[in-house]
């Protein structure tokens, strides 16, 4: 780049300026594309960037100027900065979270959740800009709005930034988005009105569909017949793809609801009121923030229509990452139904994970108490029942098998993912393999590595794994099967921090976390409990030898707050919450537990 380079956050507002610079053959580098009006617009913008990049007219920050990016992998940005937790007070003040309960009523949680999601995406952009300015102090940044500027100046003070251009007031584009969404919502209500409508079928459980084994385990556990459960698809694409993979259960689209004439009239009035409240309170937000909010009244009304047509005793979902889940809960309560949700594992990359911060269910399942009580409980509704259930990723039969696994298996399971330390971890595994030649080390990754086709963090990781397995000692193998199946071959689990570490502790395995950079990785909860974290390959090897020689044992009795150690089958806990009897009469006494199982069970809420 020549003097005074210009870097683009490409939006609908500066695309013409970009094309003008291209025509003038002036240097341009694209930081990212950002859709302000419609989410699909970002795809069009990216296609334009790809075309211009292919023709050599623009540079791409990630592909061409990677040396400017401090954290190429988003996960490493989170680990190294703990940015959401550290900036949360600023965000709450900037977005006026304290007033939402009075001003937005049932939209309060969804507003905070949605703004947190949108802001979190902006944080990475700010770090990209910071890296650019460290190398090019006089660089221009096109496409920043007031939120970008305010956050940058807060996070990186005393460094200040003056944007190349501030976009036009967002209220104009936001008003357009609101009118478009309002028209569509009212139209959707009208076409669902049936003058002589009657409620149709009742079900024990409605289940939001995502293609995950957990759903299938739950359905089998809480239903006596297929007709007990209605599977609710989020969109037609999912319905078309998976309708033949739900074991013959009845299904519907989330938009398949109905209104009576009276209910439809009330729904129109409700929608108008809700749109007005959102415009009044949030109309000045950046348009990519407001775009997330303006679709919420449609979601609420469609849930109302769905619950008019189908009656559920309980509704199960695994979508706490979506802000509209709280509006579904609001509408379920109108029908005296129970909203049930579950946290996705045990997050360990930072102290606070934004998608879990602002949620609302009637019953919410977590692996253990510690994170819920330490970070989230004060933000969660006081009436929400939070229940620890431990590992929930396996069926009942596999759960019982894992609890009674053969303690004489001595394999070492190594669960790896893209990480700023993964090459150092691979070197450690060689040392472990050489120190224990009679033990097999199994390498397992979320996706089977493939030969890289493009340059990316994932492809570089895949290349490293393939090369490592090919050139490693003979007692290192790549294992492509289920992570949980690997537990049956092993007595030890290694990982740079994963839910699997905690699950291994629950199932009686020894569990160690590669905590090789405690100053760089700011917050990781495994450090707050004894025994798991090791800081070098020498320490890990020493710990494993002490276990073999009977000098040391893993202190799992001290982990009962981190993950449920009561021995109760998680599906039995859920069955009880649904008024069903347990299928396993008593908690399982695992031979590796060194805790009072009965005491833990009695202390569960």
Image (tube, grey):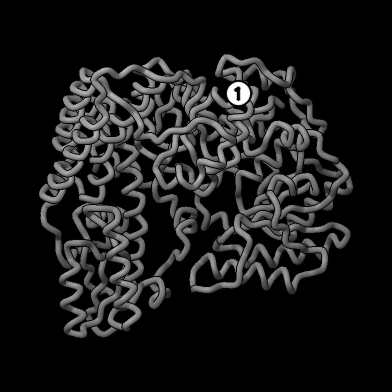
- Residue 458 shown left or right of residue 331 in the figure: right
- For the residue labelled by badge 1, is the local secondary structure a helix, a strand or a loop? loop
- Which residue sits furthest front? 196
- Circle 1 is placed at which residue position? 225
- Residue 244 shown left or right of residue 309 in the figure: right
- In the foreground, 151 or 208: 208
- Residue 507 shown left or right of residue 216 in the figure: right
When asked about the image quadrant of residue 430, the answer is bottom right
Q: Considering only vertical position in the picture, is 170 above or below 32?
A: above
At 27% from the left edge and 73% from the top edge, which residue is drawn? 137
- In the foreground, 273 or 244: 244
- In the foreground, 565 or 218: 218
- Residue 106 shown left or right of residue 397 in the figure: left
User: Is residue 373 visible from the viewing direction of this image?
Assistant: no
At 64% from the left edge and 57% from the top edge, which residue is drawn? 445
Q: How far from the left and from the top, in percent, is residue 44? A: 28, 64
When asked about the image quadrant of residue 427, the answer is bottom right
């Amino acid at each position: 780049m020549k003097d005074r380079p210009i870097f683009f956050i490409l939006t609908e507002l500066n695309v013409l300026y970009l094309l003008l610079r291209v025509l003038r053959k002036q240097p341009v580098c694209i930081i990212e594309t950002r859709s302000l009006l419609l989410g699909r617009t970002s795809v069009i913008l990216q296609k334009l960037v790809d075309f211009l990049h292919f023709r050599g007219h623009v540079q791409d920050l990630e592909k061409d100027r990677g040396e400017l990016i401090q954290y190429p992998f988003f996960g490493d940005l989170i680990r190294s900065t703990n940015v959401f937790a550290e900036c949360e007070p600023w965000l709450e003040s900037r977005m006026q979270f304290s007033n939402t309960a009075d001003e937005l009523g049932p939209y309060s949680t969804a507003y905070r959740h949605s703004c947190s999601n949108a802001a979190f995406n902006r944080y990475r952009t700010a770090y990209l800009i910071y890296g650019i300015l460290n190398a090019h102090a006089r660089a221009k940044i096109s496409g920043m709005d007031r939120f970008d500027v305010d956050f940058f100046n807060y996070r990186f003070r005393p460094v200040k930034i003056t944007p190349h251009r501030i976009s036009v007031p967002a209220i104009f584009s936001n008003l357009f988005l609101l009118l478009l969404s309002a028209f569509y919502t009212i139209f959707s209500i009208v076409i669902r009105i049936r003058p002589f409508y009657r409620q149709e079928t009742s079900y024990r459980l409605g289940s939001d569909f995502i293609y995950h084994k957990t759903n299938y385990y739950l359905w089998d556990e809480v239903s006596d017949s297929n007709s007990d459960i209605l599977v609710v698809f989020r969109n037609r694409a999912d319905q078309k793809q998976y309708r033949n993979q739900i074991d013959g259960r009845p299904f519907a689209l989330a938009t398949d609801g109905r209104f009576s004439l009276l209910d439809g009239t009330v729904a129109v009035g409700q929608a108008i009121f809700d749109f007005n409240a959102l415009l009044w309170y949030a109309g000045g937000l950046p348009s990519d923030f407001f775009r997330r909010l303006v679709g919420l009244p449609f979601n609420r009304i469609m849930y109302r229509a769905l619950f008019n047509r189908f009656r559920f005793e309980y509704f199960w979902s695994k979508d706490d990452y979506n802000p509209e889940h709280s509006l579904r809960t609001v509408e379920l309560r109108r029908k005296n139904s129970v909203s049930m949700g579950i946290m996705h594992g045990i997050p360990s990359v930072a102290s606070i994970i934004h998608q879990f911060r602002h949620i609302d269910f009637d019953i919410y399942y977590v692996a253990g108490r510690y994170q819920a009580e330490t970070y989230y409980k004060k933000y969660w509704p006081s009436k929400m029942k939070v229940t620890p259930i431990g590992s929930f990723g396996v069926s009942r039969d596999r759960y019982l098998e894992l609890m009674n696994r053969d303690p004489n298996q001595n394999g070492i399971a190594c669960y790896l993912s893209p990480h700023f330390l993964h090459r150092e971890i691979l070197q450690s595994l060689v040392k472990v393999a050489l120190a224990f030649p009679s033990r097999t080390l199994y390498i397992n990754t979320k996706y089977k590595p493939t030969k890289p086709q493009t340059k990316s963090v994932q492809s570089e990781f895949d290349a490293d794994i393939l090369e490592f397995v090919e050139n490693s000692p003979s007692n290192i193998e790549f294992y492509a099967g289920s992570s949980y199946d690997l537990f049956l071959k092993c007595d030890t689990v290694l990982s740079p921090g994963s839910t699997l570490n905690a699950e291994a502790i629950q199932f009686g395995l020894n569990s160690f976390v590669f905590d090789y950079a405690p100053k760089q990785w700011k917050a990781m909860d495994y450090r707050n409990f004894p025994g798991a974290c090791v800081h070098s390959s020498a320490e890990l090897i020493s710990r494993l030898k002490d276990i073999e020689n009977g000098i040391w044992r893993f202190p799992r009795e001290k982990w009962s707050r981190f993950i449920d150690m009561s021995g109760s089958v998680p599906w039995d806990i859920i069955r009880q919450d649904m008024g069903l009897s347990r299928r396993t009469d008593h908690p399982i006494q695992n031979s590796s537990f060194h805790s009072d199982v009965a005491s833990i069970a009695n202390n569960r809420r």
